[in-house]
Image (cartoon, rainbow, N blue to C red):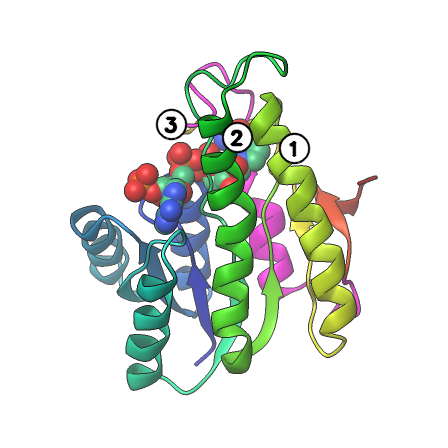
Amino acid sequence: MKTVLVTGANKGIGREVSRELAKKGFHVFIGARNRGAGLKAAEEITRQGGKATFLGMDVNDNESVTRAVREFSKLVDHLDVLVNNAGIMMDGDDAILEVSDNIFRRTIETNVLGALRATRAFTPLLGQLTGGADGWSPAYCISKTALNGVTSQLAAALPKFAVNSVCPGWVRTDMGGRNATRSVEEGADTIVWLATDAPQKLTGKFLRDRKEIPW
Ligand SMILES: NC(=O)c1ccc[n+]([C@@H]2O[C@H](COP(=O)([O-])OP(=O)(O)OC[C@H]3O[C@@H](n4cnc5c(N)ncnc54)[C@H](OP(=O)(O)O)[C@@H]3O)[C@@H](O)[C@H]2O)c1
């Protein structure tokens, strides 16, 4: 059975990607820092006949990520796909010349280092991996630009794997808000496609709607 780990899978795009990959026959590991919400998302998939396991994981915390690798390794021996979906966009991330150091640091910590931490920890178990997206608030936007740099570096360092960044568009989630133009299903589409049907040679790219877009 193919395995996928989705970080930040307890809600929003991550939960939708998890649901869809479970429907396609993956054993889905629901990476979440919130135990209650993570267990609920995993149970929902199990109720619908899919295979899902909650994996407690705060991408900001090396120990938590290491523990997650240990837990994961007790259950299965390989990871086919890693979806680095966990991300934050903080209140107060409004204008480049006003954004606080704290907001900047915390955004980079989660959106850039978090994805790198998860990738570093799970690479030994990996068969293929995919990555994050982009945005508009300054700290957030810069963090996603840096994440694209991480993607590009990882793609070069891991030639046997497919490593890509995804822009899901503006999606109706807690982060995207109610006025966003896309549903979670639309936001999840390119990520699910990369995890399943995309050519393995597609790597080191930034994609939206299953097509390469400029960095
Ligand atoms: N929505 C959009 O319009 C849009 C557009 C472009 C890109 N994206 C990207 O798509 C991804 C998913 O966004 P979304 O709209 O689904 O956002 P969301 O509904 O706010 O969900 C974000 C998820 O990330 C998790 N997360 C945050 N920090 C974490 C940490 N340190 N460790 C583990 N999990 C953490 C959250 O967990 P908690 O519930 O515990 O907070 C939540 O599960 C993000 O990378 C985002 O930047 C979204």
Task: Mark 1 and mark 2 in contact? Answer it, CB < 8 Å.
Answer: yes
Quadrant of the picture in which ligand 1 is shown:
top left
Q: Which residue is the site of mark 1?
A: 142
Ligand 1 near label 2 (Cβ, under 8 Å)?
no
Q: Nearer the viewer, mark 1 or mark 2?
A: 2
Q: Which residue is the site of mark 2?
A: 104
Residue occupying image coordinates x 31% and y 63%: 64
Q: Position of residue 106 (x, y in %)?
A: 45, 36
Indicate which disc, 1 or 2, sits on the residue closer to the N terminus.
2
Tag 2: amino acid = Phe
- Give whichever of 192, 82 is nearer the camera: 82
Q: Secondary structure at mark 2?
A: helix
Q: Position of residue 62 (x, y in %)?
A: 39, 62
Tag 1: amino acid = Ile
User: In the image, is residue 121 above or below residue 41?
Assistant: below
Which disc is residue 133 wearing?
none
Tell me the CA gap for discs 2 and 3: 20 Å
Looking at the rendering, which quadrant does residue 215 occupy? top right
Please identify the residue farthest to the right as the structure is shown: 214
- Give whichever of 3, 32 is nearer the camera: 32
Tag 3: amino acid = Asp
Tell me the CA gap for discs 1 and 2: 9 Å
Bounds of the magenta segment: 175-203
Please identify the residue farthest to the front as the structure is shown: 101
Please identify the residue farthest to the left as the structure is shown: 36
